[in-house]
């Protein structure tokens, strides 16, 4: 603990969240500022965040682990798109190997955080073990708590769902004792979770139906390295091979996403062709496998080794497209007149977005609300001193974006320490207040994104307030970008 000033504080840095983002913050902090003290505050009983919370069948990454893993700890655990337990094992190893584990306080939830300009410190009101209240103070705070509400999923109205006499399950709160053996299961949704659940439940269920309002792009991808990547992983040192594979995949993904956005008709034709090749013989693509949107205006769903389509071809899974008219005691009636008769309904309808883990925030006694604030470089928030927040990419792996934020934050903290600056406060200039046009924080048009924009910060068209873009630009910005404009160094 540090108390080198007239106003004591407990730690130089408090990191909120022990998942991918929080662990990444801790690593970069000890790498660049080894003399600063830090603690990770984690509400759950273990590290992992998403990978600790979600327990539904088949839970896995929706992007490859060669880019989703930390750049400082190569992924060597097998498949590119890996199961949740493997990822969780990897994260436990990371905190132990890097000496981060002793810095984590589990079962601690931050209820409120307040900044004092008199002491230039943050004070955290924390509940430990669900009962004990205590406080901590720090000079900096890094929010690594992710982007969704752990306690409440996205609320989607399903007409008549309360009438259903069978079991209704949301993947975010999967019952450990759920027995779906020989049951007819209907999954409502068409995103990554639904695409993962369908093939993962067919081993026990009598039949699994994915009921979608509209189709998604479900793209088959190989789940292990081949060709050049396989050669590099076999013959090169582990860290060198991992760095090269990571760079290659990041570049290919960036190129692919850019091509999809610039040439949507060509991209759509290619992706629809790839999907059509996987369909069961005699199955028409429309209406169940022809999305209405252009690629990467919403996320694409990956199906490793085409397991989703293999389940369809095996005959014990199907896809139905239509609007729900109502749910009765034993059925789902569609507007088309069709009817499904499930024993279990799974509502894979999305996540409720939130930044900061729902803690209340105040500065000098005045309450501030994150959705009302502009994001500075996608890493800090207007008017909140010495606060950094991690947010990954929606069209690439999460971790590189969070790592870019961590490296920018640690660069700024190091510079502030060397200059004796005590408060870094993002602040719009008078011109920016007059002329800056507001932009959405995320560009995707997925249901959970559109419904969740009101819970996310704002961005603008002025240089320092623009939305995050892509990894290579963000890393250049983290290492050498402007950290003096639209921010006060006090």
Image (spheres, helix red, strand yellow):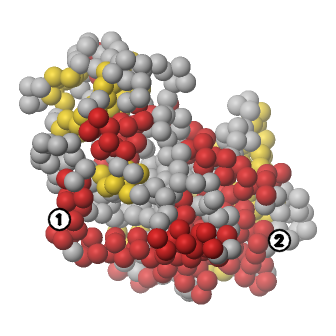
Where does the image place residue 206, in percent across and percent down from the top left?
A: 33, 21
**SS at mark 2 in the image:** loop
Image quarter where the N terminus lies is bottom right
Question: Within 10 angstroms of label 2, few (less than 14), some, or many (20 or more) residues?
Answer: few
The location of residue 89, given as percent across then percent down, is 67, 47
Foreground tag (1 vs 2): 1
Quarter of the image with the C terminus is bottom right
Residue matched to label 2: 34
- Mark 1 in CB contact with mark 2 (< 8 angstroms): no
Closer to the camera, 119 or 186? 186
Residue at image location 41% in from the left, 57% down from the top: 222
Please say if 336 is above or below 421: above
Q: Is residue 353 above or below residue 208?
A: below
Query: Which one is nearer the viewer's eye here, 392 or 454?
Result: 392
* Distance from Cα at disc 1 to Cα at disc 2: 51 Å
Q: Is residue 140 visible?
A: no
Q: Which mark is residue 199?
A: none
Crowd class of label 1 (few under 14; some 14 to 19; many from 20; radius 10 Å): few
The image quadrant that residue 195 belongs to is top left
Q: Which mark is residue 269?
A: 1
Comparing 113 with 169, the one in front is: 169
12 sits to left or right of 341? right
Residue at the spot x=54%, y=82% of the render? Answer: 477
The image quadrant that residue 368 belongs to is bottom right
Q: Is residue 72 in sight in this rendering?
A: yes
Secondary element under disc 1, as helix, strand or loop, is helix
Q: How many marks?
A: 2
Taking the view exactly as shown, the residue that stands out farthest to the left is 337
Would you place residue 152 above or below residue 485 in this image? above
- Residue at (78%, 78%) from the top-left corner? 417
Q: Which mark sits nearer the N-terminus, 1 or 2?
A: 2
């Amino acid at each position: 603990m540090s108390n080198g000033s007239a106003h004591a504080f407990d730690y130089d840095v408090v990191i909120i969240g022990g998942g991918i983002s929080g662990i990444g913050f801790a690593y970069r902090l000890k790498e660049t500022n080894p003399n600063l003290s830090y603690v990770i505050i984690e509400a759950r009983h273990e590290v992992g965040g998403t990978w600790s919370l979600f327990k539904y069948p088949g839970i896995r990454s929706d992007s490859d682990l060669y880019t989703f893993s930390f750049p400082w700890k190569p992924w060597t655990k097998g498949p590119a798109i890996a199961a949740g337990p493997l990822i969780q094992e990897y994260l436990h190893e990371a905190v132990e190997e890097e000496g981060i584990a002793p810095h984590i306080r589990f079962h601690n939830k931050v209820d409120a955080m307040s900044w004092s300009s008199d002491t230039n410190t943050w004070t955290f009101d924390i509940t430990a073990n669900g009962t004990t209240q205590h406080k901590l103070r720090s000079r900096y705070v890094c929010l690594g708590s992710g982007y969704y509400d752990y306690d409440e999923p996205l609320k989607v109205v399903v007409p008549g769902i309360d009438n259903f006499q069978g079991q209704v399950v949301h993947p975010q709160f999967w019952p450990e004792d759920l027995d779906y053996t020989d049951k007819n299961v209907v999954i409502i949704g068409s995103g990554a979770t639904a695409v993962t659940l369908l093939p993962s439940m067919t081993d026990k269920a009598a039949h699994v139906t994915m009921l979608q309002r509209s189709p998604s792009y479900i793209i088959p991808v190989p789940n292990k390295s081949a060709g050049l990547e396989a050669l590099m992983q076999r013959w090169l040192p582990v860290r060198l091979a991992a760095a090269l594979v990571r760079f290659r995949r990041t570049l290919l993904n960036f190129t692919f996403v850019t091509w999809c956005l610039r040439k949507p008709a060509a991209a759509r034709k290619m992706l629809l062709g790839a999907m059509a090749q996987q369909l069961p013989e005699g199955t028409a693509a429309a209406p169940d496998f022809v999305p209405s949107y252009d690629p990467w205006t919403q996320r694409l769903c990956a199906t490793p080794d085409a397991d989703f389509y293999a389940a369809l071809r095996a005959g014990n899974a199907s896809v139905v497209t239509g609007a729900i008219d109502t749910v009765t005691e034993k059925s789902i009636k569609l507007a088309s007149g069709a009817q499904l008769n499930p024993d279990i309904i799974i509502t894979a309808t999305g996540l409720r977005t939130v930044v900061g883990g729902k803690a209340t925030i105040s500065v000098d006694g005045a309450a501030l609300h994150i959705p009302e604030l502009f994001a500075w470089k996608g890493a800090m928030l207007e008017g909140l001193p010495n606060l950094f927040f991690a947010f990954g990419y929606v069209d690439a792996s999460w971790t590189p974006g969070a790592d870019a934020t961590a490296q920018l934050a640690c660069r700024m903290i190091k510079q502030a320490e060397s200059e004796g600056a005590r408060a870094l406060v993002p602040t719009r200039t008078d011109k920016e207040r007059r002329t800056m046009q507001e932009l959405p924080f995320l560009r995707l048009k997925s249901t959970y994104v559109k419904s969740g924009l009101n819970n996310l910060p704002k961005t603008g068209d002025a240089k320092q307030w623009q939305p995050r873009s892509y990894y290579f630009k963000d890393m250049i910005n983290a290492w050498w970008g402007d950290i003096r404009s639209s921010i006060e160094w006090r």
